[in-house]
Structure formats: structure tokens, C-alpha cells
């Protein structure tokens, strides 16, 4: 491990994630080492099945590695990451079916003990940024796949996390809508220290990020640069070292 910094959010060494499939052992991620710094804009590029989603789940504490170590240096212990510090935009629909759009967007704020009036205002502002206020009272079953994905992004923007992990957020969107979503996301995060990691195979998305990581057959390649300002006298946060799978936390935030 390197010397730790308050601007260093995540540091991982030799992460490996394997699954049993029938009688075979499948390696989804193999010996991945990386750092995520405050303010990073990282494109995680790879084809479907390359290991992108597995890596995002490990970074956000939704899954645990079969082997290797990961430390959420600037975020705190794994059990405190969500919903306040780490936000997910999943590739699959993640809205809660019984709740309206506005209720889904404000839910992470309410879980973090934000007063209902403040949570509702923040949720409406996030929907307005993405031109979604007309959908506020609709249920998820009344929405298209693209609308659901945009609402998931609005939910993320409503509560200003320290790290956003987005899995193919533009995959179901046409070009103008995808451009609006990305413009809104980047403009909202401008001049903040929120880190953004987007898994994508779209070069138009990747071109807008500061860093490019590539993953193929579970092998991660990262660049060596970082944007954070290092100070070396910070107190390290606890490190998670795991040699076997543990149950997933399936919260959709």
C-alpha cells in the first residue's frame, strides 16, 4: 500500500473475484490494483462480460473480493458507504416499484435522515436538471427504460455523494438524450470533489472523461496519473482483506 491521503478515496491491491458456475470456476476479475482520487473522472472501458460490473460492485462495497485488499481511505468503513457517500447508477432498472418517481429520488436523502421538506426540494431540483419534472408522480411501470435510467441519475445527483459509480448510464438513450444526461452530470459535478467512474463501451462517453481504464477478460489496466493533492500524514481508515465471498448488500442506492 502507498502512503495515504485524505484525497484518496479508494485503494485496492490484487483484487480477485471468482464464481462457481456448474462444475467450473469462473474468474470475473483477476489481480486488479487501482486508486480512485477525489475529483477523478474515470471511464472504465470494456465489452459486455469483461468484468466492468464486477469491478464497480467491489468498488462500492456491494460485493466482496475472493482475494486481495480494498481500503475506502477517504470514505470510511464499508458499512457506512451507502447511501450517503457512494451512489450507484445501475445498468438494470433500480427504482422501487411501489414508489413514485419523486419518492424514489428522495429516498436516499430520507434514509440519511434529511427532513422530508428538504429532501423533496432536492429531489425536484434534480428532476428539473434532467427535464423530468413531468414524470414526478408516475410509477416506474409507466416509464420507458431510458426514462428510468435518467431518473436513476437524478436520484444520484440529489444527495451529492463523494463517489458515483455508473454502469452504462447512456446505454438505453438516444444521442440527444445521452448528451443531455452527460452535460447535466458533468455540470452538476463541476467544481466539486465528487469522483465519477462510468463503465462504458461508448467512445463518446469515454472521450469526456479525464482517465481511461480498460478491462478485458477480467484484467484491469489503469493509467498512472491522478488528480488528487497528496498529503502523507493522514490517519489510515480500516482496510478490508477477504479471502472468501461474503453475502451481497443489495440496496439499490
Image (tube, rainbow, N blue to C red):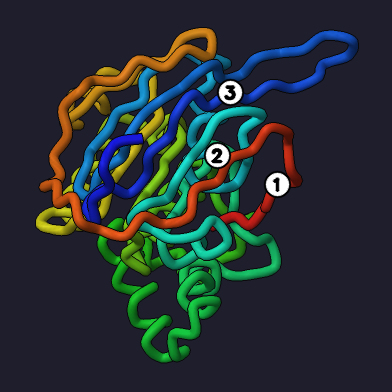
- What residue do we see at 51% from left, 61% from top? 82
Quadrant housing residue 208: top left
| Residue 46 visible (yes or no) | no
Measuring 71% from the left and 13% from the top, which residue is drawn there? 26
Pointers 3 and 1 in contact (C-beta within 8 Å): no
Q: Which mark is residue 101?
A: none
Q: Few, some or many C-alpha atoms within 10 Å of disc 3 (few <14, some 14-19, many ≥20)?
A: many
> Cβ–Cβ below 8 Å for labels 2 and 1?
yes
In front: label 2 or label 3:
3
Extreme residue toward the front, this view: 233
Relative to 253, residue 133 above or below: below
Which secondary structure, mark 3?
strand
Depth check: 222 or 113 in front?
222
Q: Position of residue 236 (x, y in %)?
A: 36, 55
Does 126 sit above or below residue 200?
below
**Residue picked out by circle 3:** 16
Residue 126 in the image, given as x and y percentages of width and height: 32, 66
Q: Which mark is residue 248?
A: 1
Q: Secondary structure at mark 1?
A: loop
For the point 30% across and 56% down, which residue is it? Answer: 130
- Precedes in sequence: disc 3 or disc 1: 3
Q: Position of residue 36 (x, y in %)?
A: 31, 40
Residue 57, disc: 2
Q: Nearer the viewer, residue 23 or 202?
A: 23
Going by the image, does 7 lie left or right of 219?
left
For the residue pair 164 and 20, the one nearer the viewer reads as: 20
Amino acid at each position: 500500500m502507498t502512503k495515504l491521503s485524505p484525497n484518496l478515496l479508494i485503494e485496492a491491491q490484487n483484487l480477485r473475484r471468482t464464481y462457481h458456475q456448474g462444475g467450473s470456476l469462473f474468474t470475473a476479475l483477476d489481480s486488479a490494483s487501482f486508486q480512485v482520487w477525489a475529483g477523478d473522472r474515470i471511464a472504465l472501458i470494456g465489452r459486455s462480460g469483461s468484468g466492468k460490473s464486477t469491478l464497480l460492485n467491489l468498488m462500492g462495497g456491494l460485493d466482496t473480493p475472493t482475494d486481495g485488499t480494498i481500503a475506502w481511505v477517504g470514505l470510511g468503513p464499508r458499512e457506512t458507504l451507502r447511501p450517503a457517500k457512494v451512489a450507484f447508477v445501475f445498468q438494470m432498472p433500480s427504482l422501487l416499484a411501489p414508489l413514485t418517481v419523486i419518492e424514489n429520488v428522495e429516498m436516499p436523502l430520507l434514509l440519511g435522515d434529511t427532513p422530508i421538506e428538504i429532501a423533496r426540494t432536492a429531489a425536484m431540483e434534480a428532476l428539473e436538471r434532467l427535464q423530468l419534472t413531468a414524470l414526478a408522480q408516475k410509477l416506474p411501470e409507466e416509464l420507458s427504460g431510458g426514462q428510468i435510467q435518467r431518473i436513476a441519475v437524478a436520484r444520484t445527483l440529489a444527495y451529492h455523494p463523494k463517489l458515483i459509480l455508473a454502469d452504462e448510464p447512456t446505454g438505453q438513450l438516444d444521442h440527444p438524450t445521452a448528451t443531455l444526461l452527460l452535460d447535466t452530470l458533468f455540470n452538476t459535478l463541476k467544481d466539486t470533489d465528487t469522483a465519477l467512474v462510468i463503465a462504458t463501451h461508448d467512445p463518446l462517453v469515454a472521450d469526456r472523461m479525464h482517465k481511461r481504464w480498460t478491462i478485458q477478460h477480467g484484467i484491469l489496466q489503469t493509467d498512472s496519473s491522478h488528480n488528487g493533492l497528496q498529503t502523507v500524514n493522514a490517519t489510515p481508515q480500516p482496510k478490508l482483506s477477504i479471502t472468501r465471498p461474503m453475502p451481497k448488500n443489495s440496496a439499490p442506492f
